[in-house]
């Protein structure tokens, strides 16, 4: 194990190491009420150092499983501070979308109501309270595992809001029938079939998966195989796709580093 964490052969994670003397962003907690879902949802909002409520609007990042990204293990605010301080990505406001009790998979497995909450309620709420972009090409939605699947679904259902998808070990093996009966008789990757059947949308992708996330049970594909499949289909349809296979498994030790890779790929040229 290196000082950055991860398995032997894993890439270093310099962006998550706090740098002395660098300014820090702020994190504010809110609760947003949804008329679409009929519930209250906790969210946390990261604003970068020097944030101003006026002037040029900031890029916007939305991440599912918000509390995990805020944890000491993940350290997302430090990653954001470092990327912004080095001008590697533009100044960005990040919205950490919290889970409601017993609803994580209900919401993050493709759910039209949750997607509509994100696009029609949460993003407008953020824009009314913070100085953020209305440009989908400067808006990123992301997450890990089921959150990566949800991010791709957001881009598919609301491309006019979410122009960039950041998926870390996305659970693209998911399909309704395969979720109920996971074996080689059922097909995986419901998202692939949706993108195949639709016109090419104005959405850019960052996808990653771990070397150890392969299908070892013979159930028709797991994280690694399904992510490669989605990558290839998206590229064949004409999408811009940044793909990375990291040395690691299905855990935050890798995701805390690849988050920076995804943000650089999607926002790094948008200064």
Image (cartoon, helix red, strand yellow):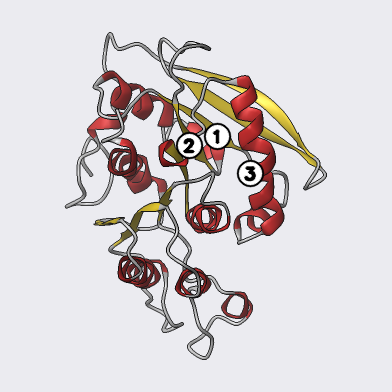
Where does label 2 land, which residue?
Answer: 69
Q: Position of residue 33 (x, y in %)?
A: 77, 34
Q: Residue most toward the left? A: 9
Secondary structure state at the residue bearing disc 2 = helix
When asked about the image quadrant of residue 170, the answer is bottom left
Q: Secondary structure at mark 1?
A: strand
Between discs 3 and 2, the one toward the N terminus:
2
> As rendered, which of 30 and 35 lies closer to the eye?
35
Pinpoint residue 156: horizontal percent, then vertical percent: 52, 58
- Residue at figure coordinates x 60%, y 82% from the top left: 181
Q: CA distance from mark 3 to mark 2?
A: 18 Å
| Sequence order check, earlier mark of 1 and 3 | 1
User: In the rendered view, does 216 fall on the left or right side of 176?
Assistant: left
Residue 96 — which label? 1
Q: Mark 1 or mark 2, which is nearer the start of the sequence? A: 2
Residue 118: image tag? 3
Q: Work out whether residue 102 or residue 29 is closer to the camera in this orientation and state it.
A: 29
In this view, 167 is above or below 3: below
Residue 132 against residue 137 in the figure, above or below: above
Q: SS class of the residue under badge 3?
A: helix
* In this picture, residue 133 sits left or right of residue 44: left
Q: Could you tell me if the residues under marks 1 and 3 are in contact, i.e. CB atoms within 8 Å?
A: no
Question: Mark 3 near mark 2, Cβ–Cβ under 8 Å?
Answer: no
What percent of the width, then of the height, locates residue 218?
41, 84
The image quadrant where one finds the N terminus is top left
Is the C-beta separation of discs 2 and 1 under 8 Å? yes
Most foreground residue, 151 or 121: 121
Q: Residue at x 42, y 31 (%)?
A: 76
In this rendering, the label closer to the viewer, 2 or 1: 1
Labels 3, 2: front one: 3
């Amino acid at each position: 194990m290196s000082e950055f964490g991860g398995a032997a052969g894993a890439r270093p994670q310099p962006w998550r190491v706090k740098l002395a003397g660098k300014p820090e962003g702020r994190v504010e907690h809110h609760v947003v009420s949804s008329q679409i879902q009929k519930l209250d949802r906790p969210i946390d909002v990261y604003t970068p150092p020097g944030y101003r409520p006026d002037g040029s609007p900031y890029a916007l990042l939305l991440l599912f499983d918000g509390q995990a990204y805020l944890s000491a293990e993940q350290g997302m605010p430090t990653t954001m501070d470092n990327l912004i301080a080095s001008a590697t990505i533009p100044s960005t406001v990040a919205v950490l979308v919290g889970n409601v009790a017993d609803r994580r998979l209900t919401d993050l497995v493709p759910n039209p109501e949750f997607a509509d909450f994100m696009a029609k309620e949460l993003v407008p709420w953020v824009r009314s309270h913070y100085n953020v972009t209305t440009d989908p090409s400067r808006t990123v939605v992301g997450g890990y595992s089921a959150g990566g699947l949800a991010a791709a679904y957001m881009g598919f259902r609301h491309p006019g809001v979410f122009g960039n998808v950041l998926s870390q070990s996305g659970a693209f093996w998911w399909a309704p029938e395969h979720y109920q009966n996971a074996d080689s008789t059922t097909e995986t990757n419901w998202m692939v079939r949706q993108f195949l059947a639709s016109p090419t949308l104005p959405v850019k992708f960052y996808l990653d998966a771990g070397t150890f996330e392969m299908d070892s049970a013979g159930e028709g594909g797991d994280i690694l195989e399904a992510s490669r499949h989605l990558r290839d289909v998206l590229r064949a349809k004409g999408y811009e796709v940044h793909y990375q296979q990291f040395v690691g498994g299905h855990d935050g030790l890798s995701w805390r580093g690849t988050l920076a890779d995804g943000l650089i790929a999607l926002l790094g040229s948008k200064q």
